[in-house]
Amino acid sequence: MTEYKPFTLAVIEIVKSIPVGYISTYGDIAKYAGNPRGALSVVRVLSSLSRKFDLPWHRVINSRGVIALNSEDGFSIQKQLLLDEGIEVDEGGGIDLKRYRFEL
DNA sequence: TTAGTGACAGGCA
DNA sequence: CTGCCTGCCACTA
């Protein structure tokens, strides 16, 4: 049984608490979880743990308000999921943070 | 255990 | 505006 850091567990809870129609950023989640510098850790959580836990990873983007996925596939999938939730996504994956950003 | 990875953030030219 | 550099943390093999 793997023991995850409190930070990681906090990230999982926060991500799961993001309501439909809203999004958040890696940096913000990291801050809420207690690590303003742990943005990359958030990436780790979504990248690795989203498979084990059912996390709405598509509701998390980078601080620039853009979908950050490398893969074209994942990018399209995330964009589609967001659009499906009523979020306006630009062709390049751009999203209006001020409008959809979920703040604790 | 050590090293590498990863969908980042912020600052600066 | 764009692009490059550094710092940061936790997970995986």
Image (cartoon, coloured by chain):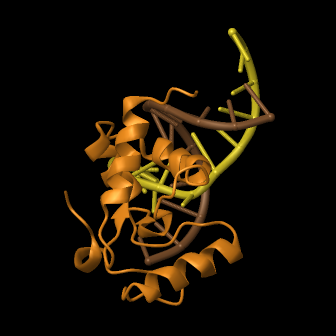
Chain colours: A orange, B yellow, C brown
Residue sitting farthest toward the left: A104
| Residue A93 seen in the current view | no
Location of the N terminus of chain A by quadrant is top right
A33 displayed left or right of A50? left
Query: A20 or A32, which is in the foreground?
Result: A20
Name the residue located 33 percent from the left edge and 75 percent from the top edge.
Answer: A20
Residue at left 37%, top 85%?
Answer: A87
Q: x%, y% of residue A84?
A: 45, 88
Please say if A46 is above or below A103: above
Left or right of residue A47: residue A17:
left
Residue at image position (49%, 69%) is: A58
- Number of numbered labels in the structure image: 0
Query: x%, y% of residue C11?
Result: 59, 36
Task: Give the position of the C terminus of chain A as an image quadrant.
Answer: bottom left
Q: Is residue A94 left or right of residue C2?
A: left
Quarter location, residue A64: bottom left
Vertical position of residue A85 compared to residue A33: above or below: below
Relative height, residue A20 to residue C9 (above, below): below
* Location of residue A3 in the rendering, given as x and y in whole percent from the top left corner: 51, 26
Where residue A4 sits: x, y (%)? 48, 30
User: At x 41% / y 54%, what residue is drawn?
Assistant: A26
Quarter-wise, where is residue A61 in the image?
bottom left
Query: Is residue A43 something one can see in this rendering?
Result: yes
Q: Residue furthest front?
A: A1
- Name the image quarter holding residue B2: top right
**Depicted A83 relative to depicted A57: above or below:** below
